[in-house]
Amino acid sequence: MGNGTENREQWGSRLGFIMAAAGSAVGLGNIWRFPYVTGMNGGGAFVLCYVAIVFTIGVSVMLAEFVIGRSAGLNAVGSFRKLKGGAWPVVGWMGVIAGFIILSFYGVIAGWTIAYMIKSFTGLMTLAAEGKAGDAFGAFVSNPTQVVLYQVLFMVMTIWIVFKGVGEGIERYCKVMMPALFVILLILIVRSVTLPGAGKGLEFYLTPDFSKLTGASVFAALGQGFFSLSLGMGCMITYGSYLSKKEILPSAAITVTFLDTMVAFLAGFAIFPAVFAFGLEPAAGPGLTFITLPNVFAKMPGGMIFSFLFFLLLFFAALTSSVSLLEVCVAYFKDEMGWTREKASWLLGGIITALGIPSALSLGGHFPKIAGKDFLDVMDFISSNVLLPLGGIFIALFVGWVWLEGAKKEATNEGKAPFAWETAWVWIVRVVAPVAIAWIFVKGLKW
Ligand code: TRP
């Protein structure tokens, strides 16, 4: 077996690593899903609940992943093999498989964002103004050539960045795309909240309604938090493996969690005030992004530009996340099979693209349904509801019970780095996180 620890690639700087890890976390999940889930689950009350969960369980599991990765200096599978062996590498294996599956459909939806950037200037606004945004979306997703073409284009960009390497590829591009993402988000927020009638949207988004905060909302917050922070599949193990021994891990985990939460929270300010200002109803899921928002932009002066900027924002968010998914797979084949980065990126990227084609076709009804679900939803279900929670439980248990002394040493840089919340962390990874995630897992298994 190869050994990736010698001459292993490293992040060039602390900032570069933070941008890459935040880039992985900030993704499609933050921008359309978080605002919507918040609106439906009691607004401000849900935000408080989400923040509480993410800054206890989320940040702790993220730190557990960083600690495992940096200590071993290997990919998700190799890390478990090196630190403990036995059946533990299976956890890493599940992560690599989850990476294949998630990226296969993530690339499809990300491809739509490229199409919509172009469409912003080529007639989407006119169609939306005529009330045909829904038909246009339907026609687009049921056109196999178009959908697959944009998916392939997006995947080639993902592969290209990963092929360029950790420092020259992932870090370099994330350092440009993440600040750009932030600036675009601020422009969109200013536009949205200054529209006449924006207040109603803010009210819908933020007014705390504790009566809507049910058990199901807590469940939604946990699931959303996990996916949003890129936890449970070894993404943060892999990114942690490229970290220098000097980096202070507990504060890095807090920073990344904070940035991810802030982007999710701010996305709601870009979306709801604008939707309500034009008297539209916030729809669920892809409909909000690809149908409701074009309707909103069509009604704004300069709508083309804002529409383009919005889809560019989604595109940047998606690309910095997709590279992290591919890197999990590439790191595994590189470390464990001795493949070159070049071979691993193009070959695995190609396989994942091919695996995504049924997802791409399923939305227009060009692929048979499996037990009543679209292929894309089946892939999403297996990864988000099965592999990620299982991975999260085992990562927490591994650090909390199996390798605790080693983990504590690594988290504090052999006792030299500050770690004020060490005791809390230990109990969260030992008990709170496994129990809470097991609960999501059981509830989420409903088909
Ligand atoms: N966090 C990203 C989002 O919010 C998606 C993502 C990237 C992810 N890497 C991951 C989710 C690893 C789970 C595991 O869109």
Image (cartoon, helix red, strand yellow):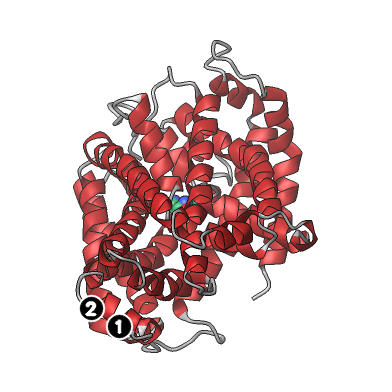
The answer to whether 170 is drawn above or below residue 360 in the figure is: above
User: Residue 138 at what x, y percent from top left?
Assistant: 37, 85
Residue at position x 57%, y 56% in the image = 202
Quick one: label 2, few (<14), some, or many (20+) residues within 10 Å? Answer: few
Residue at position x 26%, y 40% in the image = 176
Q: Amino acid at mark 1?
A: Leu
Numbered disc 2: secondary structure: loop
Residue at position x 66%, y 57% in the image = 43
User: Residue pushed farthest front?
Assistant: 196
Numbered disc 1: secondary structure: helix
299 sits to left or right of 262: left
Residue designated by label 2: 123
User: Residue 314 at what x, y percent from top left?
Assistant: 36, 58
The answer to whether 80 is drawn above or below residue 297 in the figure is: above
The answer to whether the residue labelled 2 contacts the one labelled 1, judged by CB atoms less than 8 Å apart, is yes
Q: Amino acid at mark 2?
A: Gly
The answer to whether one can see residue 276 in this image is yes
User: Residue pushed farthest top?
Assistant: 416
User: Residue 229 at what x, y percent from top left?
Assistant: 52, 47
Q: Is mark 2 within 8 Å of ligand 1?
A: no
